[in-house]
Image (cartoon, helix red, strand yellow):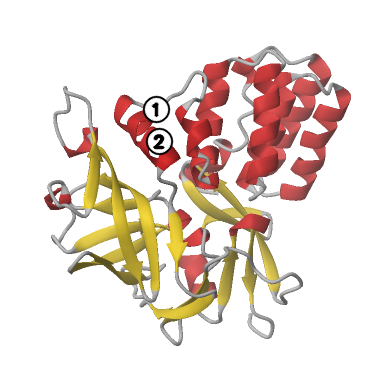
Amino acid sequence: MPALVVAAVAAVAWCGAAAAPAGAQEAALIARADTLLIAGRVFAAESLYYDAVRWNSHDPAARLALGRYLASRGALKVGAVLMEEARYFGGDPRVIAQALAPVYEQLGDYGALASLPGTPLPYPERARAEWLRDHPPAVIGPDSAWTAYRVSDSHLLGQVVLHLGADSVLATIDARQHGLVLDPSWLARREVRRFASRGARGPGDVAAVALAVRLGVFTLTDVPVRFEPQHARDGAVLGLDVLAGLAPTFDPRAGRMLLRRSGDVAPGRGGFRIPTLTTDAGVFVVKTETVFPIGHPDVQRYLRQARWTFDARNGVVLVEAGTP
C-alpha cells in the first residue's frame, strides 16, 4: 500500500494514547486493532476496539479509539458520545478535542463545537462556529432530485456548477477537502460572511460562510468556506463531505447525480457494499483488504461503470447490482 495511504488511514487508527495511559491489556488490543485497520481488515479491527472497551469500560484511551473508529465509519453521534466519555473518564481534553472537532462539524452541532474544551480551532473558526450555532446550515428543496455533474480524466469525482448570488462557479468534487473552497476574489463579496482576527495576514487566516449556495434545485444555506487561489476565478472545490450530507447517488455514464435532502438512503437498498473510512485526510474505501482513497484512479475506473451511492451514515459505498 502506498506510504501516503498508510499514513492517512493511520490517522483513524490512532488510539489517542496521549489522552491518558491505557492498561496493558487495553493498549495491546488497541495496537492490534490499529494494525488490522491499516491493513484493511476493518471488521476484525472493529471487534478489537470493542473488546478494549469491554475489558475496561472506564479506560479513556479505549473509548477514544472506539469513538474515532465509529465516527470514521459514519456513526458520528455514537462516536462523539464515546469521545466525550473519554474526556469524562480522565482523557486529555486537548487530544480528544482534536478528534471531536471535525465530528461536531459533520454533525452540524456548532453549539458543541463552539464550547469544546481544549478546542484546536483558531479564533476565526471559533467565531464562525459561534455564528453557525445561531444560524445552523440547512438544505432547501424537494425530498430528492437529479442534478447534472460531469467526470473526466482530470476530475475523477466530477464537477458541478454552483450558483452564489447572480454568479456561478465550476466546483471540482474532492474527497480530500472539507466544505467549500473559493478563490480569494470572493473575499469581499456580499454572498460571503467572513470571520478573521485583527492580525489576519491573508486569505488563509479567514474563515467564512457562503450564505446561500444553489446546487441544481437545492439551496444549501450557511456553508463553511475557506479561501485558496484557484486556476480560474470561477473555479472552486467542493468537499465530498458537503455532498455526503445529501446521500448522493452518482450516475457517471448519464452525467447526473441524485441528491436526497434527508441524507438518508432507503433501508435495504440493494447493491454491492464497499466499506468506507473517513479521516482528516479524506474518504477511503476498503477493497480486497486494501485501503484506497475514493478518488484514486483505480477506484474511479471501477465506479465509473455503474451507478454508485455514497451512504456516509452507514459507512459504505453501494454499487448497483449487476455491475463488476
Q: Name the amino acid type tagged 1.
A: Leu
Left or right: where does residue 205 sit relative to residue 50?
A: left
Q: Residues within 10 Å of mark 1 (few under 14, many from 20)?
A: some
Left or right: where does residue 158 sit relative to residue 27?
A: left
Question: What secondary structure is marked by label 1?
Answer: loop
- Could one spot residue 101 in this view of the protein? no
Check contact, mark 2 vs mark 1: CB within 8 A. yes
For the point 17% across and 23% down, the residue is 198
Q: Of label 2 and label 1, which has the lower sequence position? A: 1
Residue topped by disc 1: 121
For the point 53% across and 38% down, the residue is 104
Q: Position of residue 288 (x, y in %)?
A: 68, 60
Q: Name the amino acid type tagged 2.
A: Ala
Q: Residues within 10 Å of mark 2 (few under 14, many from 20)?
A: many
Question: What secondary structure is marked by label 2?
Answer: helix
Q: Nearer the viewer, mark 2 or mark 1?
A: 2
Residue topped by disc 2: 129
Q: Nearer the viewer, residue 104 or 51?
A: 104
- Could one spot residue 159 in this view of the protein? yes
